[in-house]
Image (cartoon, rainbow, N blue to C red):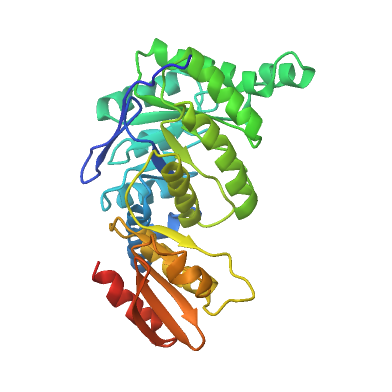
Amino acid sequence: MFNKPRNVKIGGKGKTRTIIIGGNNPVTIQTMWKESIVNLINDKKAFEDTIKRIEALELLGCDILRFAVPNMESAEALLKLAENVSMPLVADIHFDYKLALRCLDGNIAKIRINPGNIGSFERTKMVVDKARDTGTALRIGINTGSLPHDLAEMVQGGTITRAEGLVQTASREMEIFDKLDFDQFVVSMKASSVAETIESNEKFAENYNAPLHIGVTEAGPLIGGVVKSTLAFSHLLREGIGSTIRVSLSSLPENEVITAKEITRELGLRSGGVKIVSCPRCGRNGFDVHGFIDRWQTELLSMKKNITVAVMGCVVNGPGEGKTADIGITGAGDSVIIFKHGTIVRTVTVAESDSAFREELESL
């Protein structure tokens, strides 16, 4: 039997929107910024471009965005970003409690720390007290590579499993927060193994009610990472375990968001938006399915329309097999066919196809 997670409030400061993690609330999607943000302090164009990309990620389906904060310059840049966007931003901090204290001065929605490496109990208390005073949530973030020395030795000796080591580490860190009477925190226990990810989160959910941020760390490049995350998430989310998710890929954050969005939609945890169906392409191909998907995927998935779009390579898969789609596109000889609910509405040249598709799409 797994415990129902309590509610934890994220955001709500300045122009940042409020998200409630846990309880019966929808599973939220996170990603992480892939570059340093130090240059944003003095580079106006880079700052504006970053704002635009954050807004685009939000349209794509990202709910929460995390940034690494390894130094005070990064903290200042993140504080500046948090003043200018509505998406809740998270500071990811290790070792230096002063960085956490500085990030708590502004609109940053959540701080990811590991009390085990942030310093003494007094330093952790300073962070927790300020988080409470400012209404900021915290995340206890633990990975298999950062277990305490004694637990790491027990894992090495076979006394406990690595998953048990993760749960015991989380328990120790939560005891610190319990002593400080602070419950507005989320917990994550991440492994690069699907089995260890599942085991640790199940064991935790059997004993505690803190909301879980689930993810497979160091999941790998695009295909391998998608497979690992899908296997772990589908198992845990079907059991009701996991309040917020991050797909970790050696790829763009946009791909992390798209993957998480598709997983939650196929599990029935998220509805609405554009659903793309497309054929894999074969020797009958009369339309560049791959090129069309590359050009249109991000824009389509960022739309608020609740429709299905079919992208088919030939007339075999075209209007016939795509007849349940609200709109579709395929090729026949030198022409491109656009159809709605299986009925052809336009036949155009390849050069005209994108603009014609846009016109028909906007008419829906």
Residue at 64% in and 37% down: 192
Of residues 78 and 300, the one drawn nearer to the viewer in this rendering: 300
What is the total number of numbered labels drawn onto the structure image? Answer: 0
Percent position (x, y) of residue 101? 37, 33
Above or below, comparing residue 171 to residue 314 in the picture:
above
Residue 98 visible in the shown view: no
Residue at 29% in and 74% down: 360
Percent position (x, y) of residue 266? 45, 44
Above or below, comparing residue 19 to residue 32 in the picture:
above
Name, please, the residue furthest toward the left. 14
Name, please, the residue furthest toward the right. 157
Residue at 62% in and 71% down: 282
Of residues 284 and 226, the one drawn nearer to the viewer in this rendering: 284
Residue 207 visible in the shown view: yes
Percent position (x, y) of residue 279? 54, 65
Of residues 109 and 253, the one drawn nearer to the viewer in this rendering: 253
Percent position (x, y) of residue 45? 35, 68
Name, please, the residue furthest toward the top. 179
Give the quarter of the figure containing the C terminus: bottom left
Quadrant hosting residue 100? top left
Of residues 80 and 24, the one drawn nearer to the viewer in this rendering: 24
In this picture, residue 241 sits left or right of residue 362:
right
Above or below, comparing residue 83 to residue 234 in the picture:
below
